[in-house]
Amino acid sequence: MPAAPVLQPVLKMKVDELFLYWLSETTTQSMLKDYLKRIESGETIEVGIGDTSNDQPPTVSNNNKHSTSELNILSYSTSPLVTSKFCSSPPSQLTSALPSGTVLSPRNGLNTRATRRSSGIKAVQAKKENPLPPALSECIPKFYFPQGCPKRNLDVDALIARIENAYTQFDNERATLEDMGKIAKDVVNTHPGLTFLREAAEFHTRYITTVIQRIFYTVNRSWTGRITCTEIRKSNLLQNLALLEEEEDINQLTEFFSYEHFYVIYCKFWELDTDHDLYIDQKDLARHNDDAISGRMIERIFSGAVTRHRKTPKERKIGYADFVWFLISEEDKKTSTSIEYWFRCMDLDGDGVLSMYELNYFYEDQCKKLECMSIEPLPFEDCLCQLLDLVKPECEGKITLHDLKKCKMANVFFDTLFNISKYLEHEQKDPFSIPRQDVENDGPEMTDWERYALQEYENLVAEEAANENWNDGDSELSDY
């Protein structure tokens, strides 16, 4: 027999890797143990095709010792990793041990490929140039449907027509706050994740208000207070409503219906509303986040530039519904609605552009806060150069809403002008030198609002648990 050619180093490593992978399989170890017992007892073992030069399969006994090439266990045709298509006569005992559907498993398809590539070292050596046969495509399912395959006869046009027909029942074919309130109320009354909320009537109403405002915050892109059928179609509201029937954990639906998000918003409002009349004034709102927002921006919020409910019984105050818009816009300045929110506040003359005068107007208040903290502020001219480099406006000397949405760093722009704490945080991170790949990352990451709500909810729950432990300790001390 001529000497076999030496394997190339990379190919040898791959063969060794496949052999170790095959050797680590539970079925392989069981098979080898069975072989050892049968060899010790003096039985004769048939090992499949083995050496391709012989027409008869080689046998092994206690009196006949063969080399490793003759005892080619890798070519054993009864390996459970090989599908029946490649087996001449698979034993019934191994076939019956496999669970049904194993052939269709993606993992089994990979195992099949590994076994076929390691079937005989001599074959690999003699025919290295031949490409390996691909794995069977039918072994790997192309799609996975957790709820079963969808109906193929689904008429999308008919479904859209039903939605449009439902909108004809509204005045001017636009859904109002009351109309969306019916949807939110139905969610509270029917979703299993909100069973505990149905008995608390006060929080029941606050949750519905939060859901309504979040729907309008995301869907009502025209800021009219009435949602059109086109806005519904362009949003993901219908997808979230469909998920309500599948997802039992309401907190997984972070877009509109999360109870944890409602809990954070309402607790933040309750902390500012010291008299608990469900209205807050400028002094109350200024205390948010330890006086982080400048006074001039607080005045603009109460001027009516962004408040949706102007018919409030108390003048120069905002209610809980307007606070929902404020908090989401404050904690996530990257969304289209939040950029529009703060742009409206900064556009003092309402001409649709931010002039250098308007930027200086808000930055002056920011400089006063920096001086009170014994921090030397950056001159406005230098800060303006950085902001213009950040936004890159199309028209020199004017910043439009389109410029801010296009730059993808509107949060840094706004925080620099009216939020002292986040401005200092950005300065420590050196935001103007952020790599472009980080700015344009479109991966499935948490939004700034989701990250904030998660952190604040954990803090509120921990604080509540600490207060309960403190109260329990006081009650135990009072017993002595």
Image (cartoon, rainbow, N blue to C red):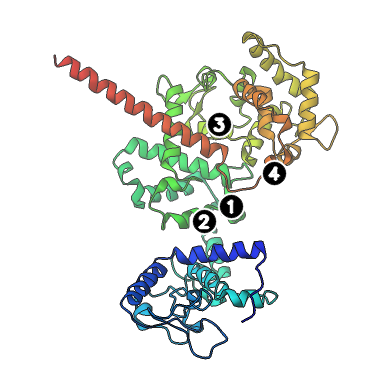
In the picture, the quarter occupied by the N terminus is bottom right
Q: Looking at the image, is mark 4 or mark 2 earlier in the sequence?
A: 2
Whether residue 371 is situated above or below residue 20 in the rendered picture: above
| Residue contact between numbered discs 3 and 2, judged by CB atoms under 8 Å | no
Marks 4/1: CA–CA distance: 22 Å
| Label 3 sits on residue | 326
- Position of 169 with respect to 341 (left or right) is left
| Residue contact between numbered discs 2 and 1, judged by CB atoms under 8 Å | yes
| Label 4 sits on residue | 440
Kindly identify the amino acid type of the residue bearing the numbered disc 3. Answer: Phe
- Marking on residue 201: none
- Which residue in the rendered view is the most extreme toward the bottom? 55
Secondary element under disc 2, as helix, strand or loop, is helix
Q: Looking at the image, is mark 3 or mark 4 earlier in the sequence?
A: 3
Marks 4/2: CA–CA distance: 28 Å
| Label 1 sits on residue | 235
Q: Tag 1: Cα neighbours inside 10 Å, few (<14), some, or many (≥20)?
A: some
Whether residue 122 is situated above or below residue 467 in the rendered picture: below
Q: Tag 2: Cα neighbours inside 10 Å, few (<14), some, or many (≥20)?
A: few
